[in-house]
Amino acid sequence: MYPEYAGLSQKVASLIEAERIGAEETKDDILWRVLSGINAPVESGEPNYFSLGQGIEVPVGERLYLYLTKPRNASQKPDGIAEIRSDGLYLNNSRVEPSHGSVLAPAMQSIQKEVGHYNRKGDLISLSAYRQWHVVRGGELIPLDQLKDPKLKRTRTSKTAKVDVSALLRELGIE
């Protein structure tokens, strides 16, 4: 026999529902997980973390917050919220299909399309998904970019670094 929740306002009931990871999770499971600091119900064989690449491991059950512009203050609402589950990243209870091994970019692009985040040419505005997606750590919003393992962090090579300047100068007869 389970005791029933009594005296919950609609506001509190909605907050409980917002923390739901799966349809099979009861309100008791949700409250236990949230109040005890457990990230997600652990079933046999279910991993506790999901890899977002470049050394970033995020606990199952954690939420990611997308800000298409730099957050001005703590009260600014995110442009989108995603949830980490054992089998991937979810937006509105739909699993995000990876593109080129990443789930962050397709999730961000989906939200950009939804909110109309286009440039003057009609293309999606080019952004770094790792800079735009945030997690809450120690009560603060932290961009995923700051959680990358420096040894695994990918960097873009500038076009000038690709050019062999001394060979170019010899070819032009300037050297």
Image (cartoon, rainbow, N blue to C red):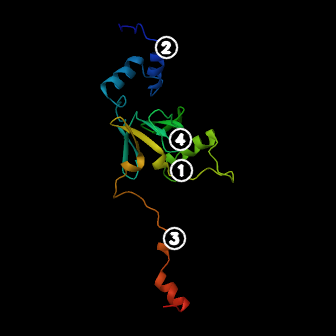
Q: Residues within 10 Å of mark 3 (few under 14, many from 20)?
A: few
Pointer 3: what residue? 159
Instruction: Please say whether residue 104 is visible from this viewpoint.
Output: yes
Q: Earlier in the sequence, mark 3 or mark 1?
A: 1
Circle 2 sits in a helix, a strand or a loop, which is it?
helix
Q: Where is residue 119 in the image (x, y as percent from the top left)?
A: 65, 51
Circle 4 sits in a helix, a strand or a loop, which is it?
loop
Mark 3 → mark 1, Cα distance in angstroms: 24 Å
Label 1 near label 3: C-beta < 8 Å? no
Circle 3 sits in a helix, a strand or a loop, which is it?
helix
Q: Which residue lies furthest to the front in this view?
A: 72
Q: Residues within 10 Å of mark 2 (few under 14, many from 20)?
A: few
Label 1 near label 2: C-beta < 8 Å? no
Disc sitting over residue 10 in the figure: 2
Q: Is residue 139 depicted above or below 120 in this figure?
A: above
Label 4 near label 3: C-beta < 8 Å? no
Image quadrant assignment for residue 87: top left
Pointer 4: what residue? 96
Disc sitting over residue 99 in the figure: 1
Q: Is residue 80 depicted above or below 144 in this figure?
A: above
Q: Earlier in the sequence, mark 3 or mark 2?
A: 2
Label 4 near label 1: C-beta < 8 Å? no
Name which residue type carries label 2: Gln
Q: Where is residue 105 in the image (x, y as percent from the top left)?
A: 52, 48
**4 or 2: mark nearer the eye:** 2
Circle 1 sits in a helix, a strand or a loop, which is it?
loop
Label 2 near label 4: C-beta < 8 Å? no
